[in-house]
Image: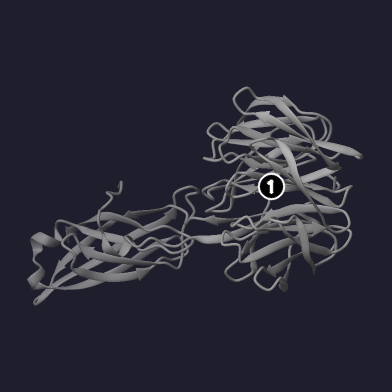
Amino acid sequence: MVAAAVTSALVVSPVSPASAAPAGRVLGYVANNGGGVSVIDTATNAVSETISDSGGTSPYMAAVAFDGTRGYVTNSVQNTLTVIDTPTNTVDKSVPVGSHPAGVAVAPGGGFVYVTNYGDGTLSVVDTATLAVTATITVGQNPDGVVVTRDGKAVYVTHDVVGPSSVSVVDTTTNAVAATIPVGSTSTAITASADGKRVYVVNKGSDSVSAIDVATRTVVGTAAVGFTPHGIAVSPNGTRAYVTNSEFDSVSVVDLTTMTELQKIVVGDRPISVALTPDGARAYVTNFGGNSVSVVDTATNTVTGTLAVGQRPVGIAVSFVPPAPSKLVAGQAQLQLRLLGFTVRGLNATLTEKHTGAPVAGQQVVFQTVKGTPLCTATTNASGKAVCDAQVPLLVGVSTLLQGFTASYAGNDEHGGAATRGYIRLL
């Protein structure tokens, strides 16, 4: 194993400017063994931020929940699991698990997270609703990689043991080992096909990948790869696997139909883990020795970029992340009569993140009457507050204005839309 591991607001509906659904982002989460999680925006292929957990060091693997709203990173030194709210990229909690946690996998539906504890031969079951360990299962020596089957009924665990190794199959109903499958030497990473029919195991000591049929729980094929393979990712269509060769500074592309290696792609120094974008168009490879991530175009199988990340990157997960839910709270404005109309002074609303309460600056807020007549538009300041005055013609009418105003934020890829209602009072 690599050195161990990382005035209350009224909601107005519908309001047209806030009704558009932002697309969200596809983000990569890199667990740096030297500390911190680097966040890669795959749209720009740049590190957008680094997440630190003061209660956890030596991050090892990384996983992101099915809907992208939570990330999970094991910290081998502190024996904890860091829980990240991915829309805001803030740390929610550190959950105590077993000794030297390594691999982490999220069950379909996101109800449970499974953590392999390399140091004590166990598997921790974490309930995502309570963020507490609900069971600890003895699985055997040096448990490392872990994956949950598509139906959520079984968890497959590899064992980083020199010589003939095996995969333990845990029944999630009984939380007990139900089967043991012999594989190659020193099994490490493990992943599953999108259709849930196959599980693929990297055998570090055998320089190979084993294909396991989930229905029969038997090895149905073996592919030879490069020297000391470590990580694996399977394409969404299930036809290709990308396997990192940690002592060969390359990634093997494997045809999963014939279980043969098609080619090797040269990447950075000591590649460890690999993850694909949801569309399978790109692979991201952590280079432990190069403090970097290689970006591979899977159409051409060429490296198109190299990104500097933290020290000794190990695990990586790539996932769609939805916008962070936003909250918009309106204040009170004042109505002033003029000769040919009205002035509404101090229309205002404050935009924040629901999860953290942090202000959202630099965003446009649209103010209207409750009947939809435009009033004004303003941009939120550093405190998340948007303020503007509006000149209103007499035709709108005093009665309409005294019903109050609406404020709406359309949202973007990072923050979801929001709407609220405020009040107008006569000066």
Left-right relation of 401 to 81: left
> Could you say where residue 214 lies in the image, as x and y percent from the top left?
65, 39
Q: Compare residues 154 and 289 and report the one nearer the observer.
A: 154
Residue at (43% x, 52% y) in the render: 325
> Could you say where residue 400 lies in the image, as x and y percent from the top left?
11, 61
Q: Compare residues 417 and 154 and report the one nearer the observer.
A: 154
Q: How is the image coloured?
A: one colour
Q: Residues within 10 Å of mark 1 (few under 14, many from 20)?
A: many
The quarter of the picture where the N terminus appears is top right
Q: Which residue position is annotated with label 1? A: 191
Residue 383, quarter of the rendered image = bottom left
Check the image and report above or below for 242 versus 373: above
Residue 269 in sight: yes
> Could you say where residue 41 lies in the image, as x and y percent from the top left?
60, 65
Please, what is the three-letter code of the amino acid marked with disc 1? Thr
Left-right relation of 85 to 16: right
Q: Residue furthest right?
A: 163
Q: Compare residues 318 and 291 and report the one nearer the observer.
A: 318
Q: Residue furthest bottom?
A: 340
Residue 344, quarter of the rendered image = bottom left
Residue 6 in sight: no
Find numbered disc 1 in the image and state the secondary structure of the residue it sits on.
strand
Q: Compare residues 80 and 8 and report the one nearer the observer.
A: 80
Residue 283, quarter of the rendered image = bottom right
Left-right relation of 3 to 136: right
Residue at (25% x, 53% y) in the render: 12
The quarter of the picture where the C terminus appears is bottom left
> Could you say where residue 263 lies in the image, as x and y percent from the top left?
78, 67
